[in-house]
Image: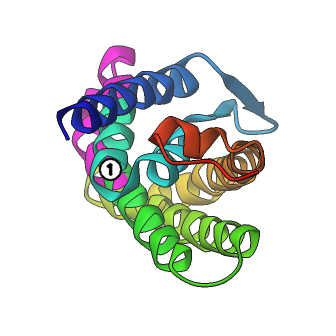
Amino acid sequence: MQHTKLQKLVLAALFAALTYVATNIIHIPTPGTNGFVNLGDCMVLLSAFVLGPVWGTAAGGIGSALADVICGYFVYAPGTLVIKALMALAAALIFRAFAKNGSRFGKTFSGSLLGSVAAEIIMVVGYFLYELPLFGYAPSLESAVTTNLPQAAVGLVAGMALFTLLDRTHLAARMKGEPVHA
């Protein structure tokens, strides 16, 4: 029992660190916006699928908020903590609901896809609502369309691709200490 808790804590810390790195180090320029998207959402989704609702929520929220703090986006850190934690929670709960039914690949793919879509909707709407009192309607809507929708698309595609790879190679199960039946 103690070993499992320690293993989850270590994996959560690892995923929080990976979320920070994927957010702050890996930038993909977006044409016409002078901005960029990052792979942070990919790691938020992976933490949800691998670690579950409790530890995945903590890792996704903390790693993302840490990225805002270290990069000087202090005004976004509280919103990011909540929004990314809610993303991970929704993704993990949907994934878990699908994991109880269906065939092995079908349940993991369907659950991860629907969980990812729900999580990215939470991200786009969450940042829109968070920015609304700070910047007003028009700038918040523009940010949602030009920054957060592309971010959601990249996070969803990258998260699904990486999770499918982890799932097919049974690496996600090994990380969780589950038995692997090839």
Categorize mark 1 by other alpha carbons within 10 Å: few (<14), some (14-19), many (20+).
Answer: many
Relative to residue 114, is residue 119 depicted above or below? above
Residue 65, how many percent across, how many down?
A: 32, 33
Residue under the point 40% across and 70% down: 93
Residue 136 visible in the shown view? no
Q: Main secondary structure of the magenta part?
A: helix
Q: Where is residue 34, by image quadrant?
A: top right
- In the image: residue 38, left or right of residue 138: right
**117 versus 59 height, above or below:** below
Which residue of the protein is positioned furthest toward the right in this rendering? 31
Picture quarter containing residue 68? top left
Q: Is residue 67 above or below residue 48?
A: above
- Side (left or right) of 141 relative to 75: right
The reply to whether residue 156 is visible in this rendering is yes
* Residue at the image point whose x is 45% and y is 52% from the top: 48
- How many numbered marks appear? 1
Residue 95 vertical position relative to residue 11 in the rendered view, above or below: below
Color style of the picture: rainbow
Callout 1: helix, strand or loop? helix
Residue sitting at 55 percent across and 48 percent down? 179
* Place of residue 167 in the rendered image (x, y in percent of width and height, measured from the top left): 70, 50
Q: Is residue 12 left or right of residue 145?
A: left
Q: Which residues are magenta?
A: 66-83
| Amino acid on which disc 1 is placed | Thr
